[in-house]
């Protein structure tokens, strides 16, 4: 019987101990420099559903409305209805099974943190990362008020009460289930000969209406 | 088929065609395009027994084209957009002209673009990648640091989850450039993502990463740590040269087989966390709304898909007799193992000939050589991948998902080829 050397045993034990992060055993290259806390803070702008990442600050829907009309309404419309093809921000509740669903913050978005995170990083379009924390709280509060998630226009949103907000469609999502729901697509029985008796054309691209400025036309955003 | 004999007429009509396509993006509604393509009537003075000018006089010298471009006769081979799809061209998409390409590699200048805040123009000297969160030691890397790490070369497709997304309710756009042009396939040079994560050292509770771009949209997505440690790359080269600005120069994330949106461009930050962030692009967008009003999320993998690129609405058949049918197939779950083609609307299928390298999670090229005597054709391709998945029909997809899921439409595409050789986007029984 072969006896393992103490070195090999030690290596195996180490490998087992670090199996969950196998890379941890790899030697480091010694590249990169450690950032200061201030450097991290300048870029660490994300917000998580449980509120981690929310900055100090506060704002009300009433305050947010004034900012929205000045900074956002040119594209999104005074009532969040979306001008031209810019995103619609409000309405659409109960439309997700409709022929033409209206996916808005109120009708579709899963977490209120997404509103804060997105406005903070990407809005207003053309001048991103220009709003301060109070302004972002206020705009977020206004958008939630516009979608009947916050009723009181004087409600002061801050990081202590943020996670109490539940979005109307929070339970409307489930993780990718294609490997079970679409199991039938894994199949080896592809027909090669005499697979159909007749074939006819049922739809043609030139017949369908793809009006260029139509809001109901398909989009990729 | 008829051809214009007057070169002047031919040039004018071609120019008009290109202009109309450039303005609206749609080619078919305005009539046949086959007479107006790049292949026209030759100038007899350039044909034997005559001697053409290029055989008599020297052309440009080596200093005239320090960065080479395609022939001027290929000027119609460009990315195109469909203006009505999006609110602004800074947050929009254009499409790769697959009907003009062959082999498996997409030239850098023809790789489709999708970005949400325009193209960031970043001096690599000023670019940094911050890695922090649930790590032993947060680190900042310069591009020079990353280029000192061990490198790999890999060929992968990148497909937008919304590729063919306009077609859920039925055929809409005439041209594989528009129906299937949100995919490109290049060779990346880069370093494994796990290398930089190892440098920082992961905490035991690390499960997800937030990956974030440095562009004006601050594009951010949650990436499962398992995938990050498996095969993700930080790429700085594509097809041998630096990433193009519109593809994320100087640094982009490569997430093999997964939807393009998570391949963060202009990558500036990775935060290690324990749960997904539910960013806008993984809840409001890139979730797949089902007929029951609920939505699938984290549908990362791009399922097996194929399309015939020639003939197609932008690339009609031009001659009777011998012809080459070709197309591309790919799967986010592994290698393409087989492609079947039908010319008669699915009554009978034949196995296509695959040529060129077959890589996992890469575009694969297929061909069918056939004779055509002007009969009407209904052509389709369907592919099989290494996991045993067979590309479904659009009807089969709709039966499960409805018509409002926008993303992940990998259904079988049908082109109707008329006796004129002209092709149209259709659906059949």
Image: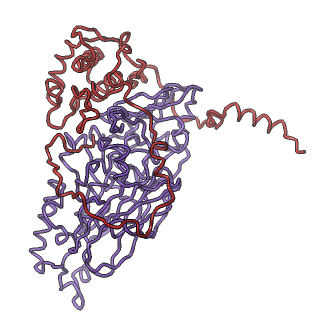
Chain colours: A red, B purple
In the rendered image, which quarter contains the C terminus of chain B? Answer: bottom left
Q: Residue at x 14, y 27 (%)?
A: A77
Whether residue B371 sits left or right of residue A62 in the image: it is: right
Question: Which residue occupies the foreground of this view, B343 or A210?
Answer: B343
Image location (x, y in percent) of residue B297? 40, 35
- What is the quadrant of residue B240 in the picture? bottom left
Q: Residue at x 37, y 51 (%)?
A: B396
**Position of residue A97 measured from the top left corner of the image (x, y, whole percent):** 28, 34
Q: Can I make out residue A196 in this image?
A: yes
Q: Is residue A118 above or below residue A162?
A: below
Whether residue B64 is visible here, answered yes or no, is no
The residue positioned farthest toward the front in the image shown: A197
User: In which quadrant of the rendered view does residue B325 lie?
Assistant: bottom left
Find residue B107 and report its horizontal and vertical position in percent: 35, 59
Q: Residue furthest bottom?
A: B49
Residue A124's place in the image compared with B49, above or below, is above
- Which quadrant of the structure image shows residue A2? top right
Q: Position of residue B349 (x, y in %)?
A: 41, 68
How many marks are shown on the rendered structure? 0
Above or below for B280 versus A197: above
The N terminus of chain B: image quadrant? bottom left
Q: Nearer the viewer, residue B368 or B355?
A: B368
């Amino acid at each position: 019987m072969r006896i393992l050397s103490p070195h090999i045993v030690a290596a195996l034990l180490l490998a087992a101990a670090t199996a969950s992060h196998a890379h941890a055993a790899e030697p480091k290259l010694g590249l990169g420099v450690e950032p200061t806390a201030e450097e991290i803070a300048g870029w660490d702008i994300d917000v998580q559903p449980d509120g981690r990442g929310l900055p100090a600050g506060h704002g009300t829907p009433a305050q947010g409305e004034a900012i929205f009309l000045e900074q956002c309404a040119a594209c999104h419309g005074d009532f969040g209805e979306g001008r031209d093809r810019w995103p619609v921000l409000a309405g659409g509740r109960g439309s997700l099974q409709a022929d033409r669903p209206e996916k808005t913050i109120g009708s579709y978005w899963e977490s209120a943190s997404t509103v804060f995170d997105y406005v903070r990083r990407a809005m207003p379009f053309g001048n991103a990362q220009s709003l301060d924390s109070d302004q972002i709280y206020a705009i977020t509060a206004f958008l939630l008020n516009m979608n009947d998630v916050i009723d009181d226009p004087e409600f002061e949103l801050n990081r202590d009460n943020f996670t109490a907000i539940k979005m109307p469609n929070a339970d409307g999502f489930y993780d990718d289930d294609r490997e079970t729901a679409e199991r039938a697509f894994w199949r080896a029985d592809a027909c090669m000969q005499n697979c159909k008796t007749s074939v006819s054309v049922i739809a043609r691209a030139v017949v369908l209406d793809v009006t260029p400025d139509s809001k109901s036309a398909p989009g990729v955003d | 088929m008829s051809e214009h004999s007057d070169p002047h007429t031919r040039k004018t009509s071609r120019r008009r065609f290109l202009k109309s396509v450039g303005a609206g993006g749609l080619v078919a509604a305005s009539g046949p395009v086959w007479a107006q393509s790049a292949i026209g009537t030759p100038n007899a003075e350039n044909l034997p027994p005559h001697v053409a000018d290029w055989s008599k006089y020297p052309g440009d010298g080596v200093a005239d084209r320090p960065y080479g471009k395609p022939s001027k006769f290929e000027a119609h081979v460009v990315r195109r957009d469909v203006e009505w799809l999006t609110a602004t061209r800074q947050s929009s998409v254009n499409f790769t002209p697959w009907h003009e390409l062959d082999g498996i590699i997409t030239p850098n200048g023809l790789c489709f673009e999708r970005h949400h805040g325009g193209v960031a123009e970043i001096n690599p000297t000023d670019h940094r990648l911050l890695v922090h969160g649930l790590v032993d030691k947060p680190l900042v890397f310069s591009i020079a640091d990353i280029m000192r790490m061990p490198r790999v070369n890999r060929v992968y497709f990148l497909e937008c989850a919304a590729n063919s997304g306009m077609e859920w309710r039925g055929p809409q756009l005439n041209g594989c450039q528009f129906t299937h042009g949100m995919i490109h396939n290049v060779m990346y040079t880069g370093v494994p993502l796990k290398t930089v994560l190892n440098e920082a050292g992961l905490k035991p509770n690390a499960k997800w990463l937030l990956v974030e771009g440095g562009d004006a949209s601050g594009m951010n997505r949650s990436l499962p740590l398992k995938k990050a440690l498996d095969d993700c790359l930080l790429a700085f080269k594509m097809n041998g040269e630096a990433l193009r600005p519109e593809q994320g120069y100087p640094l982009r994330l490569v997430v093999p087989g997964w939807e393009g949106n998570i391949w963060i461009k202009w990558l500036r930050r990775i935060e290690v966390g324990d749960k997904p962030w539910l960013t806008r692009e993984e809840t409001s967008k890139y979730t797949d709304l089902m007929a029951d009003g609920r939505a699938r999320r984290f549908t990362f993998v791009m399922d097996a898909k194929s399309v015939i690129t020639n003939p197609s609405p932008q690339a009609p058949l031009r001659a009777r007799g011998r012809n080459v049918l070709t197309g591309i197939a790919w799967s986010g779950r592994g290698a393409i193992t087989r492609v079947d083609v039908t010319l008669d609307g699915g009554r009978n299928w034949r196995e296509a000939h695959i040529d060129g390298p077959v890589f996992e999670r890469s575009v694969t090229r297929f061909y069918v050589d056939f004779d055509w005597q002007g009969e009407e054709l209904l052509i389709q391709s369907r592919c099989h991948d290494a996991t045993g998945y067979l590309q479904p029909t659009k009807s089969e997809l709709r039966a499960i998902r409805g018509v409002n899921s926008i993303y992940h439409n990998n259904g079988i595409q049908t082109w109707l080829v008329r006796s004129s050789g002209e092709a149209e986007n259709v659906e059949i029984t």
